[in-house]
Image (spheres, rainbow, N blue to C red):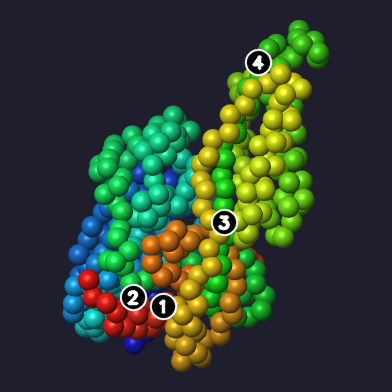
Amino acid sequence: METNVQRIKHDIEKLAQFTATPGKGVTRFSYTLEDRAARSYIKEQMQQAELAIFEDAAGTVIGRRPGEVEGPAVLVGSHFDSVKHGGAFDGTAGVVVALEIARVLKEENITTRYPIEVIAMVEEEGGRFGGGLLASQAMAGMVTEEMLTESYDAQGVSLAKAMVDFGLNPDIKAAQRRPEELKAFFELHVEQGIILESEGIDLGLVQAIVGMREYEVEITGRPDHAGTTPMNLRADALIAASQVVQQVRQIALDVGGGAVGTVGRLEVLPGAGNIVPGQVRFSVDLRSHEQTALDSLAAKLKKAVQAACKPEGLTYAITDKMNVEPVSLPSHLRDLIAKEAKDRGISTRTMVSGAGHDTQVMATLTDAALIFVPSKDGRSHCPEEWTAYADLKKGADVLLGAVVTMANQISNDI
Ligand code: HGY
Ligand code: MN
Ligand code: MN
């Protein structure tokens, strides 16, 4: 029993067409026309695979293949939203592989003991509203009303309004899954790093995923005429913001142990060459595999913002956009996957993930596993992102084996 690489290739290429920036990578934000087109395609594929289709309150598309008994389901999937000008494989590869697994089970007429669900998640990247991991956090009951009403896109549309306008159930709590109805969650994802390719290894078995804190920082001064306002009378928000940007790098270096800090987006307002910046809004993304280090990064950031603003007489606001803990993933699922790989002559190595993934949130609900396939030149979050289809097929075959094995493993029926 194996997956069909032509169908995998076809789905990846088809889904890459649903982008707001044709010719400049994949830009597929949640609850947009591109989302609508991609989700319709995913539903069509689920229909052909004879899955029962359901969309949860966050907009995640779920295709369920019944088991012999009503029992805890094995979930397999990833996300199908993207970053701005991203690649065709980040998230999408995991959704496509899950669709292919469902097609093979239908073709081979295989019914496992327990149900299997194909999961196509939304808003993992936070590309439109900031934050991210929305779908998995909704399943884990971690999404608050405030996260929905207080998150806005560049046009000032709130996440809550975008979801309702998209036709979704406004009660996000309805997306919550009960641990007892879940048996395991599997995600295949492109590595987005250079290790597998440089070592010539086929699959990465992820043992830990980095913890992430994301903030929106807003520093407010006073817009003034750039020509007539003396230097000592200014409240220039960009002066303080630029100090904080420098500090984000220093904080990560000081905390060390692989900690990283990034300011990926910065907006100067009103944003004209002859106006002293009245306000600056910017993102801060802090990560570490250690919870204590993550806490230290966050505390140092807040101190840096205060130290930069006070002498300049500026005010500031720091809004939490995301706070997910570092996780270690259960070794028994890794062992199961390693055996499936070995049986197929596919090489593996354990590794950690510097990228965040829905798996780390699903791990709070059920046993979760994340496997990586190689990324060409380690590139991701860019149009150049690429994974060879033969590599994708290796991951898909191993995941097919692991999902079926897990869905047949007797456990306490609900
Ligand atoms: O940012 C991340 O690590 C993931 O790509 N959302
Ligand atoms: Mn990503
Ligand atoms: Mn991703």
In this rendering, position of residue 80 left or right of residue 169: right
Q: Which of the two discs, 2 and 4, sits closer to the camera? A: 4
Quarter that holds the C terminus:
bottom left
Rounded to the nearest angstrom, the CA distance separating label 1 from label 3 is: 25 Å
Rounded to the nearest angstrom, the CA distance separating label 2 from label 1 is: 8 Å
Please name the residue that numbered disc 1 is placed on. Answer: 399
Q: Is there any visible trace of residue 104 in the rendered image?
A: no
Q: Secondary structure at mark 2?
A: helix
Type of amino acid under label 4 = Arg
Q: Nearest the camera: 324 or 117?
A: 324
Please name the residue that numbered disc 2 is placed on. Answer: 101
Residue 211 marker: 3
Q: Which of the two discs, 2 and 1, sits closer to the camera? A: 1
Type of amino acid under label 2 = Ile
Reading the chain from its start, which is encountered first: label 2 or label 1? 2
Reading the chain from its start, which is encountered first: label 4 or label 1? 4
Mark 3 in CB contact with mark 4 (< 8 angstroms): no
Rounded to the nearest angstrom, the CA distance separating label 3 from label 2 is: 30 Å
Residue 72 place in picture, x, y as percent? 27, 71
Q: Is there any visible trace of residue 403 in the rendered image?
A: yes
Rounded to the nearest angstrom, the CA distance separating label 3 from label 4 is: 36 Å
Picture residue at 57% right of the left edge, 56% below the top: 211
Type of amino acid under label 1 = Leu
In this rendering, position of residue 215 left or right of residue 73: right
In this rendering, position of residue 394 left or right of residue 10: right
Number of residues whose C-alpha sits closer than 10 Å to that of mark 3, classed few (under 14), some (14–19) or many (20 or more):
many
Reading the chain from its start, which is encountered first: label 3 or label 2? 2
In this rendering, position of residue 7 left or right of residue 356: left
Type of amino acid under label 3 = Gly
Q: Secondary structure at mark 1?
A: helix
Answer above or below: position of 30 versus 236: below
Mark 2 in CB contact with mark 1 (< 8 angstroms): yes
